[in-house]
Amino acid sequence: MGADRSDVALIASVSAAAGLVVAQLASERSAGSNVVIGEREYSSNHFPWRMLVHHGYEVRQVPFRNGGLEPDDIAAHVDGGTQLVAVSGVQTATGHRTDIPSVGRIARAVGALLFVDGAQLVGAASVAGDLPWIDVLAASDHKFLLNAGRGIGYCYLSPRAQDRLTPVNAGWKAGAEPLASFFGPSMELSTTASRFDNSISWLAAVGDEAALSVFDTFGPEAVYRRNAELSDVLRSALADAGWVPRDLPPPNRSTIVSVPLGDRDAVEILARLREQRIVAAARDGNLRLSLHFYNDEDDVSRIAATLKKL
């Protein structure tokens, strides 16, 4: 994330982080309160905000364009009553990377918080340039952070988000001294973002220790450079094979490369790919391919050769 550890909380999932924010917003509603979200967002960054209608909020849904949310479309939906804008750093179905600094400026201009689902971004590409514009960035460990065990997420909270939010899920881990925070009546919470910690899966923690050490070994920036290089190679190979990927501008590209399926048979395509030990997915009308630094050019050639025969 590129954040200071004092600004990061341990959470169970992206939706758990969203729920923390929903709880706060529900208590702060006033006339004209609204939140702005993506119409085709992944459910973890969509369903929690929809719950705010039960607290009198208007939930404004922005249609996708170019496979994701564009800043000018978001700008057309915010106003002085907007309390929050929620986006994905990278769209899981299309690979569209959001222009977070531009969206952040739009949110700041109306005093809204910016929530970013970083599940498909953190660990895959640098977020250093985005972080100053983000209030809450939540990422799960089982995507590009490499832990197959699942069960832990990481949540960056900006100083203003920490000041505004109440740790409604506070338990013993939220204490200034967790091992001295098992019982009431005293309640001395941490002064850092750890007061927003949830109890976590210990098995997942063991997995994270091993998985995250890979980034220490190679260095995050080396991983990000390799990912960008491989995604460019894949885009070119797919186009040469007649499977033209979504035409995203370079700043909106990510390690997820998707090809609109049209009337192609997704079930057959995925089966043929599995025969060649290629794992892919059909998501929202797209063939979704996702690379990480452990892939190589031979993998890309195998994908292209298999698809060219279909």
Image (cartoon, helix red, strand yellow):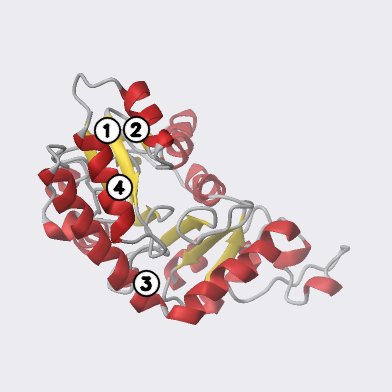
Residue 45 image position (x, y, % from top left): 42, 42
Instruction: Name the residue: 39% across, 54% down.
Output: 115
Q: Are marks 3 and 2 in contact (CB under 8 Å)?
A: no
Does dot 3 land on a helix, a strand or a loop? helix
Q: Is residue 119 above or below residue 5?
A: above
Say few, some or many: other residues with alpha carbon within 10 Å of mark 2 (under 14 / 14 to 19 / 20 or more): some
Label drawn at residue 302: 4
* Three-letter code for the amino acid on which mark 1 is drawn: Asn
* Three-letter code for the amino acid on which mark 4 is drawn: Arg
For marks 3 and 4, the one nearer the N-term is 3
Does dot 1 land on a helix, a strand or a loop? strand
Q: Are marks 1 and 2 in contact (CB under 8 Å)?
A: yes
* Three-letter code for the amino acid on which mark 3 is drawn: Val
Identify the image quadrant of the C terminus.
top left
Which residue corresponds to mark 2? 283
Does dot 4 land on a helix, a strand or a loop? helix
Label drawn at residue 223: 3
Left or right for 208, reference 183 = left
What distance separates the C-alpha of mark 1 from that of mark 3?
A: 26 Å
For marks 2 and 4, the one nearer the N-term is 2
Residue 281 image position (x, y, % from top left): 38, 35
Q: Nearer the viewer, mark 3 or mark 4?
A: 4
Q: Are marks 1 and 3 in contact (CB under 8 Å)?
A: no
Which residue corresponds to mark 1? 286
What distance separates the C-alpha of mark 3 from that of mark 4?
A: 22 Å
Say few, some or many: other residues with alpha carbon within 10 Å of mark 1 (under 14 / 14 to 19 / 20 or more): many
Q: Is residue 220 above or below residue 119?
A: below
What distance separates the C-alpha of mark 1 from that of mark 2?
A: 5 Å
